[in-house]
Image (tube, helix red, strand yellow):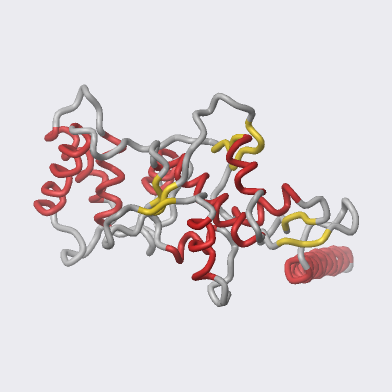
Amino acid sequence: MIPIMNEKKYVEDLMELSKLPSEVSPNRMITLLTKYYYSSEKNEQEVADLVCSAMEKYNLKIEYYQDYLARNRIKRVFSSICNGRTPLLKESDNIPLYQSEFNNIMSCSTDRERKILFVLYIIARHTDKYGWVYLPDSDIYKLANVSKTSKNQPNIFYNLLQAKKIKFTKRVDDLKVGVELSDGQEPIVLEIKEFKHMGNQLISFVREEYKMCEECGKLIKKKNNKKKYCKKCAYEKENIRKRENARKHREKHREATFCSEIENL
């Protein structure tokens, strides 16, 4: 699952909805709400009552939500938080990349390797103080803007491992990947404010000739400072503008016709 920068705000936004989005399962929402309502001043029962009350508004079918099953899950999450195994909601507004991490990224052989390593540093700093990333490869590639059809995909992690830029655990069934995080006692090179298009964010930062489309995040070559969108988004924006102008023209014409008819009465 793709991480969320500010989990608390994310939960509060979900609580404003009358229906859960398709990408948020009831169990996922129960876990998030348990973290949201958790407090050293509240016992498990109080938290469970708040969570179940919040879940009622979604009017979920019985096959997706049952109160007693929800309370069992809340009990497990509450206990895990108390024992320090489950963290509370994150409220990050940005995530820094430090000088030594940036230098390590830029010493990679290819842009694909740089983008993957960049994503690993950012996600690790956000989710695990020991530098481990628990995302599946497919999510890492997506965040890094590395094509799923790239023939070199399997080689990227191997090359990074051979260069001692990443590490794996010794357990064959444990697929997490790790990086050595900076202790933070050095200059910050850049800060990430959202997880979307992280690979493109890096390239637009290190390559002056590129910028990101303000609509879709695609990399585009700079021709002038006025260019904001890729060709596809620029075309769609222009069509929207034309439709809006046509709508205003029709309204103006109807208003003028109506006024003329009134005068002729």
Vertically, is 19 above or below 126? below
Looking at the picture, how far across and down is residue 206, in whole percent? 74, 48
Q: What count of labels does the image hold?
A: 0
**Residue 258 shows in the view:** no
Residue at 29%, 53% in the rendered image = 28
Q: Tell me if residue 79 comes above or below residue 146 in the rendering.
A: above
Image position of 165 (left or right of 236):
left
In x, y percent, where is residue 265? 84, 67
- Between residue 67 and residue 169, name the one nearer to us: 169
Q: Nearer the viewer, residue 27 or 181?
A: 181
Quadrant in the picture for residue 8: top left
Q: Is residue 143 visible?
A: yes
For the point 13% across and 47% down, the residue is 71
| 222 relative to 250, above or below | above
Residue 157 is situated, as x and y percent measured from the top left of the image, at 49, 61
140 to the left or right of 128: right
Q: Which residue is at the front of the view, 244 or 253? A: 244
Q: Quadrant of residue 102?
A: top right
Identify the residue at horizontal 11%, vertical 48% (top origin): 72
Q: What residue is rendered at 49% in x and 70% in y?
A: 154
Residue 213 spot, x, y in % from top left: 73, 58
Where on the picture, by quarter, is residue 80? top left
| Quarter of the picture holding the N terminus | bottom left
Give the camera-side residue of 118 and 39. Answer: 118
